[in-house]
Amino acid sequence: MENTDWKVELGLWVNNNDAVYEADKQELLRLTRYFDFKKQVSAVVVGSEAVYRQEQTAEQLAAKVREIKSELVRIGLGNIPVTTSETWPSYFQPLIDAVDFVNMHGFPFWEGISIEKANDKMFEHIYALQAAAKGKKVVVGETGWPSAGDNYQLAVANLQNSKRYLQDFVCRAAREKIEYYYFNSFDQGWASTNNASNVEGNWGIIKSDYVTPKFAEPMYVCGASTHS
C-alpha cells in the first residue's frame, strides 16, 4: 500500500477466547510502530459477528471497542474510528453507544424473503439502526444474494435474483447515500458447505477463477448511469 492512496479497515478477531483478542490487540499496537496508520487505516474493526455467534455479549464486545479506542488515543491515533461488525438484530444499544459508526451486516436471503421484497426489508433494518444510532453513521458492512445453491424458504438462489439484488441495493444505496461493502467480490469454491443452505461459495460478482464476471455487462444500471 505504500505510495498509494489506498486505506484498509484493520480487523481484530474476537471469539469466546479472549486470548485471541489480546494477541490481535498487541499486534495492532505493534503495527502502529511500522506503518502510517493516519495515512493507511480508515477504521479499526473489533470483531465480526461475535455477538451473533453468542461468543460475546454486547456489553463484553462494547468494552473491547472502548479499550481499543483508548489505546489509539494513548498513542495519538484517536482520530481513527473504531467499530465492530455485527448482524442487524445483534447490534444492541451498548454496541451502538460504543462504536464511532455502526457497521451492520444484513442478508434478506437468510431471512427467507422473496427477491421482490428483499431490498425493502434490507432498508427497514438500515432505517431502524439509523434511528437507534441517533446521528452516528450506519454503514452496510456486508449484504448480497447468492447466485446458486439451495433455496431458503421464499429466498431463491439463482443468477437472476443475484443480479436483481445487486441492482436494487446498489442503486438505492446510491440514492440514499448509504455507504456499503458488497458481499462478495469473488465466488469462494473453498467455502464451507456445512450449513442448512448450500450457498456459501456463490455470493461473488466474479467467478471463482478471480477473472470472469458473473453477470453480463453492464452489471447494473442506475438511472442513466451504467456500471460494469
Image: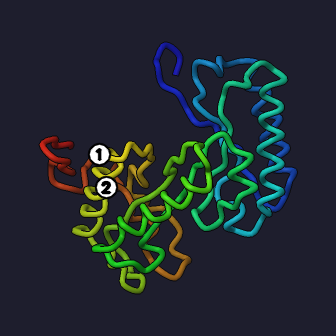
Q: Looking at the image, is 119 positioned above or below residue 205?
A: below
Dot 2 corresponds to which residue? 207
Residue 60, by quadrant, is: bottom right
At 84% from the left and 58% from the top, the residue drawn is 17
Which residue sits furthest top?
A: 3
Using the numbered discs, state the Cα–Cα distance from disc 1 to disc 2 in whole angstroms. Answer: 7 Å
- Extreme-bottom residue of the structure: 153
x then y, percent, for residue 4: 46, 17
Q: Mark 1–mark 2 contact, CB under 8 Å?
A: yes
Local SS, label 2: loop
Query: Which residue appears at 78% of the width and 28% of the height?
Result: 72
| Residue drawn at (40%, 60%) of the image | 144
Q: Which residue is mark 1?
A: 211
Number of other residues with Cα within 10 Å of mark 1, as a class: few under 14, some 14 to 19, many 20 or more: few
Q: Which of 224/18 is in front?
A: 224
Residue 113 percent across, percent down from the top left: 39, 78
Tag 1: amino acid: Val
Residue 181 shown left or right of residue 167 in the figure: right
Relative image position of residue 20 (x, y in whole percent): 81, 50
> Residue 196 bears which disc, if any?
none
Quarter of the image with the C terminus in it: top left
Q: Amino acid at mark 2?
A: Lys
Mark 1: secondary structure: loop
Residue lying furthest left in this view? 224
